[in-house]
Structure formats: structure tokens, C-alpha cells
Amino acid sequence: MNTQTISTLFAGVMVALALIASACAPEQPTPEPEEQAVSPEAQPEPAQIPPAQLDRAREAATALGSELQAALLSALERDGPLGAVEVCAVEAQEISRRHSDEEVVARRTSLLTRNPINDPDPFEAERLQALEDAHARGDLPPEDVELRTEDGERVLRYLRPIVMAEPCLACHGDPGRIDSSVLELIQTEYPEDRAVGYSAGDFRGAVSVRIRLGEALEP
Ligand code: HEC
């Protein structure tokens, strides 16, 4: 890949990431409680979501997103897409770990993953499907928040949708149009890769934050 292609790609990534960042701006309205999915189990009312914990989830999602974005951009600039694949392969999980501790886990997930470590848990899979359906209706919410009881513990589950942009296709687009050496490296690093074949504007997945809030008050 020549320098022109790389700098065009880089400029594209900047634009797309700016778009993604603005699509995730925190001032966007939180969905009304009545729009929240109702779980069949006895779950706390959405209105009880503690604002400080919701802020914590939003901050974790933003921090993870911006650090990943910075890592991707600097790798693309320095090494081009081929080098960036290697950086992503090592750094993405490391960055995710750095934004997680015993109480808060921040990660990326998708219904079609590249790295199986990012596979959704059952709750995430259900919510990702609902978000994908909402996206297909042109009604994608900026975030999806639910206070739940899991294994006798209260947890806050927070998902911020990720939508594909043009520069992402260098590594997630139609395999026939991905640079052959980039594709080869992806297939070597990720033999179970399912994260190709996307178009710009497709629903890709979400940044997912899970915060443990302590023992449930009721059984
Ligand atoms: C340089 C190649 C490259 C580019 C460009 C790229 N990605 Fe990725 N992407 C990867 C790699 C490699 C992984 C696997 C990271 C890991 O091991 O967790 C990945 C993983 C992901 C994941 C985590 C879920 C999964 O499939 O494992 C999401 C979400 C994602 N990418 C979205 C995007 C978006 C959105 C863009 C555009 C802003 C983008 N990617 C651009 C290479 C790339």
C-alpha cells in the first residue's frame, strides 16, 4: 500500500472517528424509561438507575473508545493498515483490561466478532440483536442502559452502539476489497474471524460496560 493510500485512509479514519465521536456525544438524550426493554425476570425499575453509576458507565465507555481510537490512529499513521492489525491484535485487549477492575468491566462486543474473546454474553447478545433491529428501523438509540440482578447481585449494564464508517472497511469490509496482505494477516491472527463483509453505516456492535453494584436488596 503506498503512502498516498495510507494518508487517504488516515484522513478518512479521522473524519469517521469524528463522526463516531459526535454520534456518541453524552448530551444526547437518554431513552425514556418506557422505551427500555422489559425483562421477563423480576428486575428493578429503570428509574432506579443511580445517576452516579450511569455517569461512571458513560465515562468508562468514552475512555475506552478514545484510547482505542488513539491507538488505531497512531498505528495507522506509523505503520499503515498492516502494522495497525498487529497493534490492534496486541493492544485492543490490553486497553480493555486497563479500563476494567473488580467492579467495572469495559470491553467491545459484537454479534460477529473477529476475536472470540469479544463474543457477547447472553444479555449482550439479546441487547445487540435489539440494537441491530432498531438500527434497521432507523431508530438506533445512543445508548442502552439496564439495571439488573445477575447471580444475586445488582449490576448496571450499559451498551453504546458502534456503527461502521468507511475507513473501518480496510479491515472489516468485503474480503475481496481488503488489501491481500492485510487480509492474510487477519486470517492468521484470527482464524475464527467473522468481522468482515461490512459496509459503511452497518451496525457493528457496542462498547459494553458492566458495573457491579453489590448484593441485591431483594431475593
Ligand atoms: C487496521 C485494521 C483495523 C481497522 C482499520 C479497524 N479495525 Fe476493528 N478490529 C481489528 C482487529 C485486529 C480487531 C480484533 C481486536 C481484538 O483482538 O480484540 C478488531 C476488533 C474490532 C471490534 C471488537 C469486536 C470483534 O470483532 O472482535 C470492533 C467493535 C471493531 N473492531 C470495530 C471497528 C470500527 C468501528 C472501525 C473503524 C473506526 C474499525 N474496527 C477499524 C482491526 C481493525
Image: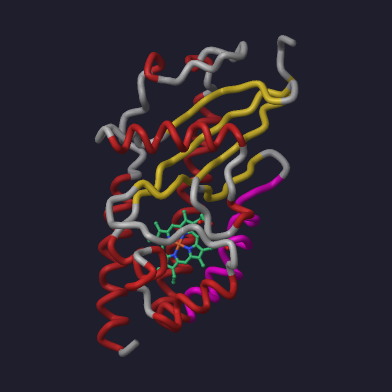
Quarter placement of the N terminus: bottom left
Numbered disc total: 0
* Residue 97 spot, x, y in % from top left: 65, 55
Left or right, 23 with reference to 39? left
Q: Quadrant of residue 175?
A: bottom left
Residue range of the region highlighted in magenta in the rendering = 83-101
Q: Look at the image and say whether residue 147 sits in the magenta stretch.
A: no
| Residue at 29% across, 74% down | 9
Residue 36 or residue 119, whichever sits in front: 119
* Residue 94 sits in quarter: bottom right
Q: Quadrant of the C terminus?
A: top right
Front-most of residues 29 and 138: 138
At 57% from the left and 49% from the top, the residue drawn is 107
Residue 152 picture location, percent across and down: 74, 21
Q: Nearer the viewer, residue 26 or 183?
A: 183
Looking at the image, which residue sits at the far front?
Answer: 176
